[in-house]
Image (tube, grey):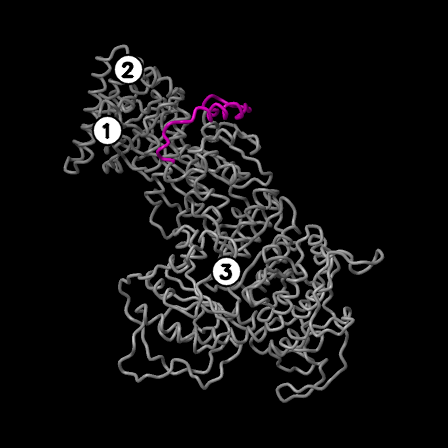
Amino acid sequence: MSSVSGSSTNHSARTVTLGGASTMASSIASLDSSAPTSPSPSLIGEKGLFVSHKDRRGPNGYRFATQCATVEDPNHKDQYGSSSVPIYMTATFKGLPGAEFDYTRSGNPTRSMLQHHLCQLQNCRHSFAVSSGMACLDVITRLIKSGDRIIAGDDIYGGTQRLLGYLASHQGIHTDHVDTTDASKVEEALQKRARDYELGLCGKVSMLLLETPTNPLLKICDLERCARAAKRYAPDAIVVVDNTMMSPYLMRPLELGVDVVYDSGTKYLSGHHDLMAGVIACDRDDLGQRIAFTINSIGNALTPMDSFLLLRGIKTLAVRMDRQQASAMHVAHYLHSLGFQVNYPGLASHPSKDIHDRQAAGPGAVLSFETGDKMLSEKIVGATRLWGISVSFGCVNSLISMPCLMSHASIDPKIRAARRLPEDLIRLCVGIEDTRDLIEDLEAALLEAGAIRRKASLSSTPSVESSESLQSSRAGSPSPSPLPEYERVPLVAFAVDEPIADLVGGLDRAKIETRGGEGEGSKANISPPTSVIVSAPGKVILFGEHAVVHGVKAVAASVALRCFAHVSDREDGKLSLGLPDLGVEHVWKLDDLPWDVVPEKLRIGAEAELGAHEELDQGLIAAIEKCVGDVVNETDRSHAGSVAFLYLYMCIAGKEAARGQAFVLRSSLPIGAGLGSSAALSACLASSMAYTYGRLEVPSSAESGIPASDAILINSWAFLSEKVMHGNPSGVDNAVAVYGGAVAFTRAHPSNNLVGNELEKLGGFGSVRFLLTDTGVGRDTKSLVASVTAQKEKEPERVLAVLERIQKISDEAESLLSNHGVPRKDLLSRLGELVTINHQELVGLGVSHASLEAIRAKTQNERFKLSTKLTGAGGGGCAVTLLPDDFSEAKMKELELELSRDGFKCYETRVGGAGVGVLIPINEKEKDKKESEIPDRVVFEEAETKTLASWAEKAGEWIYA
């Protein structure tokens, strides 16, 4: 494909008058000037003339509006002198090899004229016309390679989001989404990724992708500052801007340091919504040659007919934009004067107006406003007659829509709220109709909906001056109009007579986009975090071990010791599970996993249903067992955890969304000691997968905790993981790991006639001290539970009597902890007695062992006089000792020293703390320099076990269930 140059033959010098000053045309700043476009006067030119954006001359000597209407390419003169560019409707051209045109995919005279014209308008050396705006981005992203990285906004066009997701899953090109309306966040992201690339932790940042203003909230990105940051921290990165909202008439990002600009030609450039087209512009020869090669190779260049239609539309661009923007300014001021919250960069109240004014020649013709009530907004939209209810923008006809019901309806309401997208928001895309008609129609709709009412103190006056000519493209206010004769009505509950769904007929909302075209997709398209850190507590079962499996109440509480999971993307597209505390790491190729065995009921976990799938799919487990593989240091325990990991991963992620990830799990809990380390691990896996695959939304720092509904889902998935590892778990371990605190838990069982598990929160444990002692004797929960079951079948009377006595112990403990009137000394004394009695019953079931009995003997001797029992269905891998209030620190140190000499590890703790948690990272700027130089994953993997908790606490703010 031939590159189209933006240069033109020189015009003879001519004298012009500008602002009263006379000078030669060559003295006027051309579009080649490096000064940024600005609606404010910019000092340009040899004689210091102040020349506004629309008055600046292009390389052909004409101002912008004249350039739009004047299609002239000295290198392609029509042989018949036609006043309109001919349409060359041919696939091939006759001639010898080497001719300029031979095949329309590679070049066509009609398209060449269009591209030359676009070069004149955008002041660039290379312009290309392709089949759509998304075709533009497809071509541009082919400039980067597999393994590279993109930084893009977090509020971008849905089609862009989908393409970026495809690049991540199919080509290993991953994207970091940041708030590009805050340039400092863009700088931080670029700096961090540059540091990560130097350490070999990720691919280099090869593209910065920006949009401004955003749609539909009209937020602004500082293009010049972001482009400078990219050149500083990622000098090889291509800075790309989607300029569809502004068009070349109002903003020229190439003059602000941007490398590549693209527009959806379907919008303002065409102006009539009667064609699909996309336009790419760049001023770098290296990029221009690569883009031309790509378009010729994949064959998505614009057809001759569409090239002709787009060229025809461009001729009226300046006229249309002037009219649309002036009308939009009047509409914005009208709504603002009534007291509505209006989002429009032309208003002085817009928070980023100064930034927008520095880089654009006008505010554009799209605005949005809030009514404060969703049903009221629906009535307003439904009551308009002149404003067409539709998505997209840039057309000569005015359009109205409610983004949350139309273009953004597919986004989860919680995500819309997090993005501060109001449910009542109305978007207006202003056309070229008479401004008075537009405002009158809008005013009538506001009246009919009950949003405004007539002011009693004012006589009737027109809402818009009919005698005043409308202002043009400036971002300042138009000439003052009379005060409106109406005022806003205080908000009340509104009834909707004609729902918006009826007005849009059979329109498929799932296929409507912010900017037109296909739908924004499901909530999975709303980029979930690529990295997350979660944690979950261990537990102690104080009363009711083993009996809980058979429907007896158990009393359990969380401990301060926790498991942690760190999840990040892998650049090689593989899946890994690292267990540094056990020296185990598994790595799998995603295609090697048995995806075809995942049953339909578990695929891409339907959140509303997965909790009910308590029965494991044995076929899937068997298939995972075959592919999990053996690695160095693998044990039965780590192998079971790896199988559970893959089971959850394949159900929650799903084959289509699965991507390369590294899961690293650490534990400050002793593993295999009966303190619920497997349940804590399960809660970490379930929550981290749910967050990184968008099944749940990461809570914000403004929220008081993880929502109860989210905790229920995490618990359901964690229980599935526990079942994979333990066969028939009670459910109490994962419940404590997720919900935290202290609970009385009763599992549904034929013996108690419960329909579902019962879980009751208890409040008396927070101030009680315990000593946890790890015996170091690993016990197999599955085998020990099976042993008690076998005893029950063989000796039902004896075992049932034991279970009944344990039930009474748990009932009394629950009563004591629920009765806040019990004196403290009496409470601790009786709890100690119950601890001793409960342990004796468990000894009778054969689930204790010699090391536990040695610890009990040590703690209850005459010097210490403490009550100790085994804890956990695992058969007492750990002992729990109740510490009275008057047990001194000196005695505590003496006891710990003696136990450690015997080879035991001690952990003093309080119980009843928080449940599963997710880290809200602190700002990079808040980290000290030393820490910020080391990626979190490296710190996480190398941290000593005893420092994990303090590291996590310093890493950021935690939100807990």
The relative height of residue 151 versus residue 875 in the rendered view (above or below) is below
| Residue kind at label 3, given as amino acid type | Asp
What span is colored magenta in the figure? 610-639
**Residue on which the image places disc 2:** 845
Along the horizontal axis of the image, is 381 left or right of 282? left
What residue appears at the point 35 percent right and 40 percent down from the top-left corner? 711
Residue in the foreground of this view, choosing between 324 and 797:
324
Mark 2 / mark 1, whichever is N-terminal = 1
Residue in the foreground of this view, choosing between 685 and 278:
278
Question: Quick one: label 2, few (<14), some, or many (20+) residues within 10 Å?
Answer: many
Tell me residue 751's x, y (percent).
23, 22
Residue 864 visible here = no
User: Marks 3/1: CA distance?
Assistant: 54 Å
Task: Point out the image quarter for the N terminus.
Answer: bottom right
Mark 2 / mark 3, whichever is N-terminal = 3
Along the horizontal axis of the image, is 546 left or right of 308? left
User: Marks 2/1: CA distance?
Assistant: 25 Å
